[in-house]
Image (cartoon, rainbow, N blue to C red):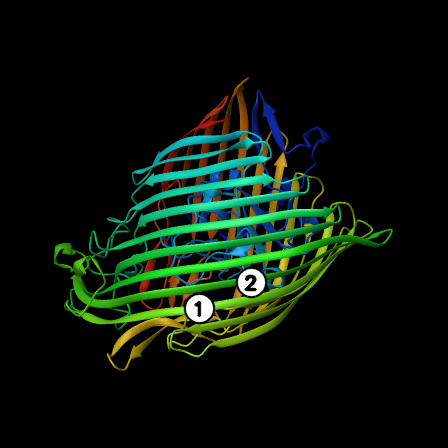
Amino acid sequence: MTISNKSWWLSAVAATAILTGPVRAADADSAEERDGLIIVVGAPDRSSAGTKTDTPLAQTPQALTIVPAEVYLAQGAISISDTLRYTAGVVANPYGQDSRTDGGFVRGLNPLQFRDGMRDIFSYYASIRGDPYNFSRVELVRGPASVLFGQGTLGGLINLVSKVPEFDTGGEVALSYGSFQRKEGFADLTGPLVEGLAGRIIARVRDADTRVDNVPDDRVMLAPSLRWRAGENTDITLLGLYQEDDSGSTSQFLPNVGTILPNPNGKLSNSTFIGKPGWDRYDGRLLQGTGSVEHSLSDRLKISLKARYIDSDLTYLTHYPDSYNSPPNPYFDAAQRTIGLYAEGSYARLNIFSTDNNIQFDFDTGAQIEHSLLAGIDYSWNRVRKTGSYAYETIDIYDIDYASLSDFGGGLPSAAYPGFLGGFSEDTRQKQLGFYVQDQIRFWDRVSLVIGARRDYTRTQAAGGVAEKDHATTFRAGLIAEIVKGVSPFLSYTESFEPISGTDIFLQPFKPKTGTQYEGGIKFHPDSKTLITLSAYHIREANRPVGTIIIDPSTNLPLNGEIQIGKLTSKGYEFEASRILPGNFELIAAYAYNKIRPQIDNVPKRTASLWATKTLPIQSDISLRLGGGVRHTSVNYSGTIRTPGYTLFDALAEVNWQDWSFAINATNLFNKKFYASCLSRGDCFIGEPRNIFATFKKRF
């Protein structure tokens, strides 16, 4: 199905007209209660994501999006990437659903992932994915946020907000079954343990296959937590996490010739597995411990202390075809069936310690001038260790003889096996210390000015190399004013400084990325149920790593890696709206246009989406919730390779009876076959297939 740009513009205009319609005063609440069942709709109107203080979104001079768990789970999200599929300026899963990592573009650039305000992902293929069920919401900060968070990309950052214990007893247990033999049970229980102490336990057990043959998606996750109210003004929270994934790679790197480009033998199946059954895997174990203390010295003075330690082990054994050999045709024979096959194995260990500590002081400098001054220090340390090796074989990709492929004794490729190419190792340590200050000034309860500055010091050292020391000062300034009720234009200037862990293709430590963004827009918020944001931005970035291939002169074989290029410019505009209409009818609409120079591989210029839900009362204690969505991603390019755009439909049907519910989710409902992206280097990535699953749930 093809939807023209004009049609999407008309849809956006129509959605705007609907979303800005009148609202009756009787419908001012954002939750509807019937016989003990509370249906929560809409998004929070306050967040600390952009300022580290509890600030209304309508008073924050920056484009932010808050996606509550109730919303992204209703949309069928099964990964962190999925949670932002209906968010403006985001391309979720740009290389298809990846069982190894969560990926996406924000304003054309890769965002960093944070958890509870502290970064939790360093390097590639050194850890496993987070579980969306473990979080109460996902926050997207568009544009740089280095003044507060230190390590931030220009496009933005994703902050995952953990569920914490509550002092009211509640929770749920559920069972789910769906496509690809997906079977799982999960639970979330919370409540008081003794006076002043609450606990919470979140758990998931999953046994599942994936769209790719011989690639599982199994998980065990356990997240216990405690919350202690140590007095009227002190709140202490401890969060734990154990997670183990037994999976593989759903990214099989199928060659362009045989996917998006013709091959006389036909198209390769989207479920094609290129590897050795039983050897290929992506298995990881993750341990996390987080502690936070919130203490109010007075009603105007507050201290916040946070710290986290992460320990991650990962085994990554995989095969991928040599699609990079003499493109555009990588086959060795005239029949175009025989292709080279790389075997790569690695063991990775990732350790992270991070802490963020600040003090907030609220004061006035006049009858109509209010300040919220924030000053803080954060520190992080991480170490990434990897050991790996390569081997090389050949296969008939249309009729793979799996038995003939080596399993290397269950371990890494070595010289004891034919085709061994050599090994590699990495041991990189990075430290960062940052000092930040920010003042939020509120004039006449209508105008908000945010100004801030930060100083960072970093040290990066690869084993056997010379330590790279860097420092930077970054600034931010933003102004938003409610010129008439519910209409607030804003302007902002932000800077970024991002130390990069790891080494380039020449084994030299990466230099930090730096950049600036100018943003302007307007927020419409006529009532508590409506928030519409229109924004435009201009971004400039330096020292960006990009993938490249060079020929190793010692082996005459290609090496994959990254180099850092010069400047990059990303600019565009976005529209995003959420609105709750009378009768518990919710709409979320988004449209974005982005242009990058020099062009980055596989960044589409346009995305658009529309999601709606409606709850219908059936009887006094029975309700039916129906939902549906459509999302469109335009064509993208990699060199001369053009990957067509695609339009996908999602659906939800949920029956609620007293404390029980039964829901059916469907993503890519019509099972559209598409490629998420294809690269000029020679390989393609399969788009998400239809996924249908049913969930039976009991609430407490």
Instruction: Mark yes or no: residue 3 visible.
Output: no
Q: CA distance from mark 1 to mark 2?
A: 14 Å
Instruction: Mark yes or no: residue 264 visible.
Output: yes
Q: Which mark is residue 429?
A: 1
x, y (%) of residue 60?
Answer: 68, 53
Q: How many numbered marks does the figure carry?
A: 2
Examine the rendered structure and indicate whether residue 326 appears above or below residue 406: below
Residue that sits furthest to the right in the current view = 367
Residue type at mark 2?
Answer: Tyr
Which mark sits nearer the N-terminus, 1 or 2?
Answer: 2
The residue carrying mark 2 is: 379
Neighbour class for label 2 at 10 Å: few (<14), some, many (≥20)?
many
Residue type at mark 1?
Answer: Arg
x, y (%) of residue 4?
Answer: 49, 52
Neighbour class for label 1 at 10 Å: few (<14), some, many (≥20)?
many
Residue 618 placement, left or right of 318: right
Q: Which mark is residue 630?
A: none
Q: Residue at x 44, y 46 (%)?
A: 241
Residue 428 placement, left or right of 251: right
x, y (%) of residue 21?
Answer: 68, 38
